[in-house]
Image (tube, rainbow, N blue to C red):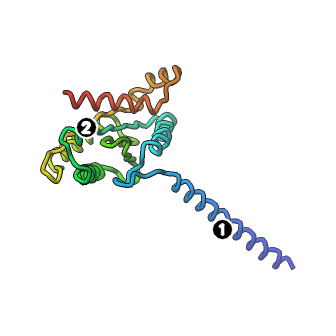
Amino acid sequence: MWYFSWILGVLLACSLGIINVLRLEAQECLANENIAIDPLTQLLVRESVIERLQEKVDNSKRNGLPFSLLYLSLTDFKLKHQLPEHEMDTTLLAVVSSIKSDLRMELDIAARVGEEDFVLALPGVALDRAEEIASRIKRNILLHVTTPSDVSVEIGIGCAEYSDHAEFLAEEVMMGADEVETLLNIAIGRCFESVTA
């Protein structure tokens, strides 16, 4: 008799374990379905990346590890060169391919946040290392990416590190500003400084 009770207990435990696994997989699929992806570049869009950036900022606060952000912009490249839509799309795909070659696929986050603007989140990367990565990305794009009509691509890149600006960000947040948006604005400011320099 105890034998049957024991078997029923094991079967019940197994079925509950399977139900929990299926429930977790369903939640994961649902979470993945809510992530918006840019149809052209297959990168996250602005709305999706802001939430992910907040997670990285929270991790940096909790663990004390560095977290850097790169903002990349072609700064009205399409308008300056009067490119047709298909040429601009081809050029953007080449830029994204160059950007992705420097990503750590499991850790880094890439997003398209504007028509010609991108964000890279680099968890665990300090500002000096992020600046090296930015220089390498910029050099690769300048050397290897051109439009189909052979126009070289100009790009500006700005870097910001969370831990460098933690006190400033805390002040801004106390004044009602969003931490991630403030960090993003620092990177954007540096990006446009690099374009004009």
Image quarter hosting the C terminus: top left
**Residue 11, how many percent across, how many down?**
74, 73
* Residue at the spot 77% in from the left edge and 76% down from the top edge: 7
Tell me the CA gap for discs 2 and 1: 53 Å
When the figure is inspected, residue 43 is found, relative to residue 62, above or below; the finding is below
* Residue at the spot 36% in from the left edge and 28% down from the top edge: 186
- Front position among marks 2 and 1: 2
Left or right: 180, with 145 as reference point: right
Left or right: 107, with 92 as reference point: right
Amino acid type, residue under disc 1 in the picture: Ile
Q: Secondary structure at mark 2?
A: loop
**Residue 123, how many percent across, how many down?**
40, 42
Q: Residue furthest right?
A: 1
Image quarter hosting the N terminus: bottom right
Residue closest to the eye, 119 or 171: 119
On the image, numbered disc 1 is attached to which residue? 18
Left or right: 81, with 162 as reference point: left
* Residue at the spot 39% in from the left edge and 41% down from the top edge: 124
Residue closest to the eye, 67 or 92: 92
Residue closest to the eye, 61 or 74: 74
Amino acid type, residue under disc 2 in the picture: Asp
Estimate how packed mark 2 is, as few (under 14), some (14 to 19) or many (20 or more) residues with alpha carbons within 10 Å. Answer: some
On the image, numbered disc 2 is attached to which residue? 76
Q: To which quarter of the image does residue 121 belong? A: top left
Left or right: 41, with 197 as reference point: right
